[in-house]
Amino acid sequence: MKPHILIVSLSLILLSANAVAAGNYIDPVQKEIDQKHKALVAKYKKSCSANNKVSCLLEAKSKASEEVPNRGSVAYSKSQYGSLNKAQAKNKVKELVAVYDKLDGQSSASWDGKITQRQIESEIKWIMSYRLDQSMPDIYTAKMYVGAPLN
């Protein structure tokens, strides 16, 4: 009877691992940004004059984020969505709502290319505010705007 318990336990562990792996959505744009950040952080750490490694790392990460903005930041949103017309903006919101829903229940672990619902919602809010003239948008108003389910 004990071998059966071991087999069932191992099966559950493997199924759990597969479920977690499936929840690790990799955004190709953010993955490219993350790779650029790694190179820039290494470059900026070398030129850091502070004697504290942590301070140098934080300064290097800050400079890298200024040079190559992360998804969800205002700088990223302005550069990527600032020239959209209303029809393009509505289509982009629809795409981003689908990504937002795909990220529901995502692992809290970190990996290259990881984006969060908060980042996507920030981009949606920026588009809704600055391209679609919606005041105080959130994910629910965006879903209603594009006709997506509110689940």
Image (cartoon, grey):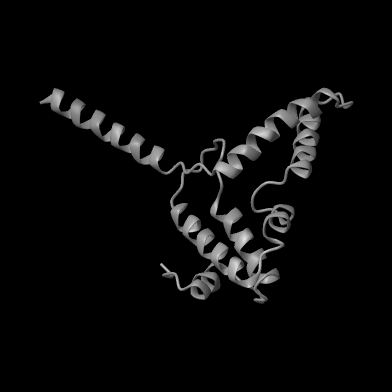
53 or 140: nearer the viewer: 140
In the picture as drawn, the residue positioned furthest to the left comes out as: 1
145 or 52: nearer the viewer: 145
- Please give the name of the residue rendered at 55% of the width and 37% of the height, measured from the top-left corner: 110
- Please give the name of the residue rendered at 19% of the width and 27% of the height, measured from the top-left corner: 7
The C terminus lies in quadrant: bottom left
- Please give the name of the residue rendered at 55% of the width and 42% of the height, measured from the top-left corner: 28
The image quadrant of residue 122 is bottom right
35 or 45: nearer the viewer: 35
Percent x, y for residue 125?
Answer: 63, 65
Question: Residue 88, relative to residue 107: is it above or below?
Answer: below
Q: Is residue 88 left or right of residue 103?
A: right
Q: Is residue 121 left or right of residue 104?
A: right
Number of numbered markers: 0
Question: Residue 121, relative to residue 3: is it above or below?
Answer: below
Percent x, y for residue 77?
Answer: 69, 57
Percent x, y for residue 17?
Answer: 35, 34
Percent x, y for residue 134?
Answer: 65, 76
Question: Residue 3, relative to residue 144: is it above or below?
Answer: above
- Please give the name of the residue rendered at 53% of the width and 75% of the height, measured from the top-left corner: 145
The N terminus lies in quadrant: top left
The image quadrant of residue 56 is top right
